[in-house]
């Protein structure tokens, strides 16, 4: 016996209500889901461990901080920046030291903070024995007004002529247009804790810090072969640490950390 038309309508109405309830539950769960401000993971490459942090610039605001705007004193360390953020209603979600600095704890090369160039581009060609910054080529990591990021060699950054909202110059370049910096030696015994950055896509930034001393060639190979970065920039060594909210610090031992000149940060409203 077939069900009557009113019975069919009743069943349809019940099914529609059930679907609506299920949809509302899914939507509620989606709204309540807390999207992480970043992806942090441990990676093993060529027998060595690294901490890799990926940021989506569509969702997170990556900024640079050198001096406290209230007193013009350098932040110098991540904890001080974290406390400043808390005092201003911001929770520090991620932090990393920026580029190489000089003996007076000022950035050695280009430093742009919130659209202001505080230190100009440095194209000085020095002796490689004088430090990593002088190993050619060095480069710039920049975030532009439209929100996209890029790693460029310093000469190419100058040739581009594009103003940046945030930028740090460091060196050497680890990967250049899909090739490992030819200055690096595969089996070099010069090892340090090292940190670096790349823009895997215009809006996906990847930071890496080693969990033990590593040579330049292995570190660059990680960016190229494991992470798929066509251009990557070395940030610093021995003193490099990342702060990851909920996890703590990664990278060099705390006793090796010295004052920083420039700190990358991602803040969230408290």
Image: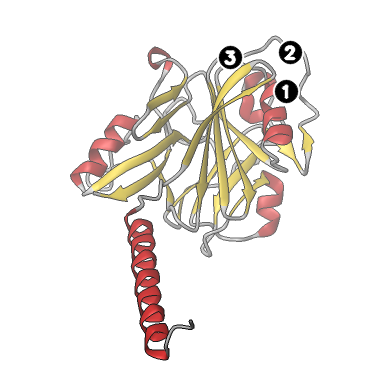
Query: Is the residue marked by circle 3 packed among few (<14), some (14-19), or many (20+) residues within 10 Å?
Result: some
Determine the residue positioned at 28% across, 37% down.
82
Residue 233 figure quarter: top right
The secondary structure type at the circle numbered 2 is loop
Whole-number angstrom distance, CA of label 3 to CA of label 1:
12 Å
Residue 139 figure quarter: top right
The secondary structure type at the circle numbered 1 is helix
The foreground one among 188 and 139 is 188
Query: Is the residue marked by circle 1 packed among few (<14), some (14-19), or many (20+) residues within 10 Å?
Result: many
The foreground one among 164 and 79 is 79
- Residue that badge 2 annotates: 188
Residue 196 in percent (x, y) is at 58, 33
Whole-number angstrom distance, CA of label 2 to CA of label 1:
8 Å
Query: Is the residue marked by circle 2 packed among few (<14), some (14-19), or many (20+) residues within 10 Å?
Result: few
- Asked if residue 43 lies left or right of residue 226, the reply is left
Residue 213: mark: 3
């Amino acid at each position: 016996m077939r069900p009557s038309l009113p019975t069919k309508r009743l069943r349809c109405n019940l099914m529609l209500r059930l679907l609506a309830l299920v949809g509302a539950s899914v939507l509620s769960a989606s709204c309540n889901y807390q999207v992480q401000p970043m992806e942090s993971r441990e990676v093993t490459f060529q027998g060595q461990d690294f901490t890799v942090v990926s940021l989506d610039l569509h969702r997170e605001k990556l900024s640079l901080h050198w001096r406290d705007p209230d007193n013009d004193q350098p932040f110098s360390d991540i904890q001080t920046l974290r406390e400043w953020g808390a005092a201003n209603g911001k929770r520090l979600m991620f932090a990393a030291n920026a580029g190489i600095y000089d003996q007076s704890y000022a950035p050695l090369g280009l430093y742009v903070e919130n659209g202001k160039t505080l230190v100009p581009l440095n194209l000085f060609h020095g002796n490689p024995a004088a430090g990593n910054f002088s190993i050619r080529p060095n480069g710039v990591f920049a975030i532009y007004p439209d929100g996209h990021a890029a790693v460029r060699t310093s000469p190419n950054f100058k040739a581009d002529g594009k103003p940046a909202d945030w930028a740090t110059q460091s060196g050497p370049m680890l990967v250049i247009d899909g090739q490992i910096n030819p200055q690096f030696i595969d089996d070099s015994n010069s090892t340090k804790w090292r940190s670096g950055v790349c823009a895997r896509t215009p809006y996906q930034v990847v930071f890496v810090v080693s969990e033990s001393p590593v040579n330049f060639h292995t570190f660059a190979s990680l960016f190229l072969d494991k992470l798929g970065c066509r251009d990557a920039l070395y940030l610093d060594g021995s003193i490099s640490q990342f702060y990851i909210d909920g996890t703590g610090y990664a990278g060099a031992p705390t006793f090796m950390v010295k004052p920083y000149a420039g700190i990358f940060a991602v803040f969230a409203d408290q």
